[in-house]
Image (cartoon, rainbow, N blue to C red):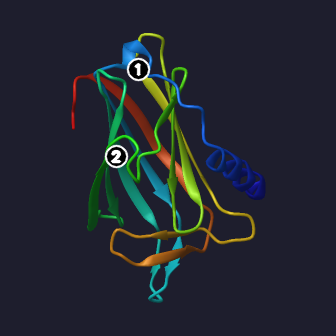
Amino acid sequence: MRAWVGAALLLVVGAAPTAAAAPPELLNKTVQVRYTVTIPGRGDDGSTVPGIRNAVRTIYISSAGRAFARVERADGNRGQFQEKKEAGPGERGNTLQFQGRRLIGNMPFVAGASHMEIDFDGGGSSCTASIVVGRDAGRALRWKGVNGVTYTATGAASVSNVACSVSTGNAL
């Protein structure tokens, strides 16, 4: 099953979705997706981690339909390592594209990636999100921690506590 998920993710990540305009009901709205990714791992420095990362992705869809993004991440059980990054449309770290009423984005790791899909209701007032983590066939999942250490997965990746909300205006 894991190999299939990884192969499916490679197909999704490798194929660029056809860009579409943002639905009018989503213009000038902010979308926020909160989630936890857990990937136990061993660092290149020999350390081991439970690999718990809490993340908040905030996406502003402008009145012109352009998506601006911010990610805030905290690694560790107590969030002792934190990071914030922002990216405009087309900038590194912002692969967000609309397909109908669905917003899709890929987040590459050192090896492997995660794929996020956000589905909106017809009025653009609520959303649901799903996130899948996959690896390249035959390669271990690798990621860079907020602390700067690169880790290799020693167990399966899981995504939990996914929550999605929509609000009017620019929260960035």
To which quarter of the image does residue 75 belong?
A: bottom left
Q: Residue at x 52, y 68 (%)?
A: 110
Secondary structure of the residue carrying numbered label 1: loop
Q: Position of residue 130 (x, y in %)?
A: 54, 38
Q: Residue at x 74, y 53 (%)?
A: 7
To which quarter of the image does residue 85 belong?
A: bottom left
Would residue 96 be found to the left or right of residue 26 on screen? right
Front residue of 117 and 86? 86
Would residue 111 be found to the left or right of residue 65 on screen? right
Q: Earlier in the sequence, mark 1 or mark 2?
A: 2
Image height check: is 78 above or below 114?
A: below
Residue 152 appears anywhere in the view: yes
Amino acid type at mark 2: Val
Q: In which quadrant will I find the C terminus?
A: top left
Disc 1 crowd rating (10 Å Cα; few below 14, some 14-19, many 20+) is some
Would residue 44 be found to the left or right of residue 12 on screen? left
How many numbered marks does the figure carry?
2
Q: Position of residue 115 (x, y in %)?
A: 56, 46
Residue 125 appears anywhere in the view: no
Label 2 belongs to which residue?
56
Label 1 belongs to which residue?
126
To which quarter of the image does residue 89 belong?
A: top left
Amino acid type at mark 1: Ser
Q: Position of residue 128 (x, y in %)?
A: 48, 29
Image height check: is 91 above or below 39?
A: above
Image height check: is 10 above or below 172?
A: below
Q: CA distance from mark 1 to mark 2?
A: 17 Å
Q: Residue at x 40, y 78 (%)?
A: 149
